[in-house]
Amino acid sequence: MRVAINRIMVTGANGFVGQLFCAEALARGLEVFGVTRLSGASLPNVKNVVVSDINGTTDWSFALVGCDVVMHLAARVHVMRETSDDPLAEFRHVNVAGTEHLARSAAAAGVRRFVYVSSIKVNGEETSKGTAYTEQDNAAPQDPYGVSKWEAEQALHCVAKETGLEVVIVRPPLVYGAGVKGNFAQMISVVAKGVPLPFASVNNKRSLIYVKNLADALMLCATHPAAAGNTYLVSDGEDVSTTDLLRKLAVVMGKKSRLFSCPVVLLKLAAKIFRKSDQVGRLLGSLQVDSSKVRRELGWVPPFSVDDGLKATVKDKI
């Protein structure tokens, strides 16, 4: 049985996940306060709230009045061209201090639950094939973003202990869907153009989550009584290899899958030479997530399959 809520505040409301989540919340009859950093980023039927910056001093009082739940999606994410001399300090400024301050402000305003969208990067960057990350694994973040997300989680546990605020932490892997950017968008573009790719022999496994599946899981985390105080890893539950993913994308776009084999060792060497080791490493390595806890404890079943998600993702590319 779910807890009834009336008003929810969503940070990062105009982002990739935020827009979809706001639409899901509205469809379920909730009043949505959408927090953005852009005054012109209003969303249909969402009460837009503008903040200039998220940090340890942001004034949240005007946005939290009457809210039952805070869905915290906003964050400083991976920066392609980092210019800061101290990236970790910049990540901590927003992701740690900003998150803790928001949680304390929420508790003071009488908010019941705080759902924090963290990242699978808290667990690490890669798993051995056939081995999946779980909530019980020790944290092993490898970059400033992952470190800041882990530290934010710890700060939230402290706030929960001190104030009674119900905290729920969700760690998704790669999120995809219509409007996705970054490496996934580049992959779609390359497949659409019919560019031959040397990944036919790649036999890895990676967990993904379709953005609508994530929104559904987040809504459950906002309303299910058993979610309070828990951390959940979420995924579509259909792990795929890079080879399978490329082939699936080709099928849904009506394109030919132009894959050929190349020894993985040569792919890694080429990536090192062209300084693309991180990017190519994600295509060659495995990263699997065990989402059985959220399914078992909250009864969550992803409403969409990977094929459903991929069809929606490339709909405007066909």
Image (cartoon, rainbow, N blue to C red):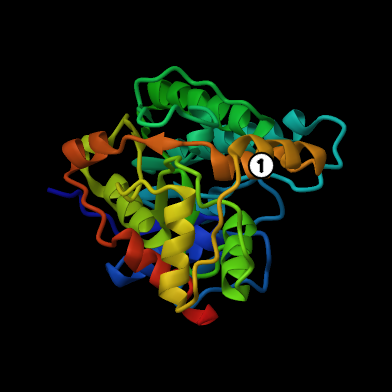
Q: Position of residue 109 (x, y in %)?
A: 44, 43
Element type where label 1 sits in the image: helix
Residue placed most toward the observer, 105 or 238: 238
**Crowd tier of the residue under label 1, counting other residues whose Cα lies within 10 Å: few below 14, some 14–19, many 20 or above:** some
Residue extending farthest left: 1
Residue 41 in which image quadrant: bottom right
Position of residue 291 in the picture relative to residue 186 (left or right): left
Residue at 47% from the left image edge and 76% from the top image edge: 253
Please provide percent x and percent y for residue 98. 62, 38
Q: Is residue 227 left or right of residue 197?
A: left
Instruction: Write the residue at 42% across / 21% down.
Output: 162
Three-letter amino acid code at the position of disc 1 = Leu
- Using residue 40 as the reference point, say whether residue 139 is left or right of it: left
Residue 264: image location, x then y, percent: 59, 38
- Compared with 243, 169 (above or below) is above
Q: Is there any visible trace of residue 55 in the rendered image?
A: no
- Residue at 17% x, 49% y is 2
Residue occupying image coordinates x 41% and y 71%: 251
Q: How many marks?
A: 1
From what the image shows, is residue 172 above or below residue 7? Answer: above
Q: Out of 47 and 311, give the one closest to the viewer.
A: 311
Q: Position of residue 281 (x, y in %)?
A: 62, 38
Q: Which residue is mark 1?
A: 267
* Residue closest to the far top: 138
> Where, by quadrant of the figure, is residue 181 drawn?
bottom right
Q: Is residue 298 left or right of residue 186?
A: left
| Residue 38 in view of the camera | yes
